[in-house]
Amino acid sequence: MNQILYGDIILLNKTDLVSEAKAKELEDYLCSVKERARILRSQHGKVPLSLILDINLSTIDGSLDSGTQLNQNAQHLNNDGFMSVSFQSDRPIALKKFQQFLDYQLPDNVFRAKGVLWFAESPKRHLFQLSGKRFTIDNSEWTAAPKNQMVLIGRKLDALFLIQTLNNCLTQ
C-alpha cells in the first residue's frame, strides 16, 4: 500500500494474464487510492524507460523537485524511509568495476534499480533491471548519445555512498 501511496508512477504488470475488465477494475481502484498517479500497464515488467526516467515528477511533500541536485543526482525521501537515488554520467562504466559494485558493494537496503548503462567495453546500450540481488541486462542500439542513467530504490539509502561508489565505476 505504501508503494501505491508514495508512487507518482504505478507499474501494473502482467496485464496480459487478466481480462481487460479486470485490468480496468484494478486501475480504477488504484486511482481511488492515489488520484494523480500515472498508471502504466506492462508485460514482463517492460516499460519504455522514457516513461519512468527523467520525467520531472516531484516528491510527495513537494519540497524537492527533480531539478534538485546532489552531485548530479537527485535524492527523494518519503516519510517511511523509502527513497530513490538517481545517478547520471556522460562517461562510460568499466564493466569489471560495475560487477564488483553489484557483488560486493551494493547495500542490502537497495531493493530495486533500473536504468540505461554505457559500458566502455561494449558499443551497445544496456537496459539494467535489479530486484533484490537478481539483475538482468538487455542490449539494444543507441538512438542518442551514450550516457548512464540509473535509479536505485530502497530504504534509508546512503545517497553519497551510492553516488561515490558508482562514480568510482566510471572509466578515467
Image: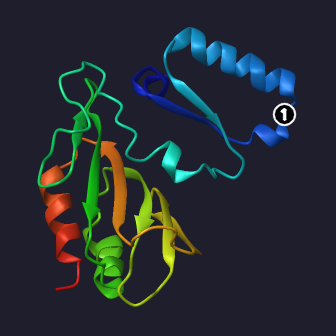
Place of residue 150 in the rendered image (x, y in percent of width and height, measured from the top left): 36, 58
- Residue 59 picture location, percent across and down: 29, 27
Q: Residue furthest bottom?
A: 121
Residue depicted at x 44% and y 20%: 5
Number of labels in the image equals 1
**For residue 25, side relative to residue 157 (left or right):** right
Pointer 1 local density, CA inside 10 Å: few below 14, some 14–19, many at least 20: few
The quadrant in which residue 91 appears is bottom left
Can you name the residue that lies furthest to the top here? 32
| Colour treatment of the image | rainbow
Residue 149 falls in which quadrant of the image? Answer: bottom left
Viewer-side residue, 123 vs 97? 123
Residue 30, given in percent of the width and then of the height, sits at 60, 18
- Where in the figure is residue 124, as x and y percent of width and height? 51, 80
In the structure shown, which secondary structural element does the residue marked by tag 1 occupy? loop
Q: Foreground residue, 151 or 80? A: 151
Is residue 84 shown left or right of residue 71?
A: right
Q: Is residue 33 above or below residue 159?
A: above
Amino acid under disc 1? Val
Q: Tell me the residue that label 1 is attached to.
A: 18
Instruction: State the residue at coordinates (50%, 49%).
Output: 50
Residue reaching furthest to the front: 144
Q: Residue at x 24, y 77 (%)?
A: 169
Query: Along the horizontal axis of the image, is 119 left or right of 81?
Result: right
- For the C terminus, the quadrant is bottom left
Tell me: residue 63, above or below residue 150: above
Q: Give the image quarter of residue 93.
A: bottom left
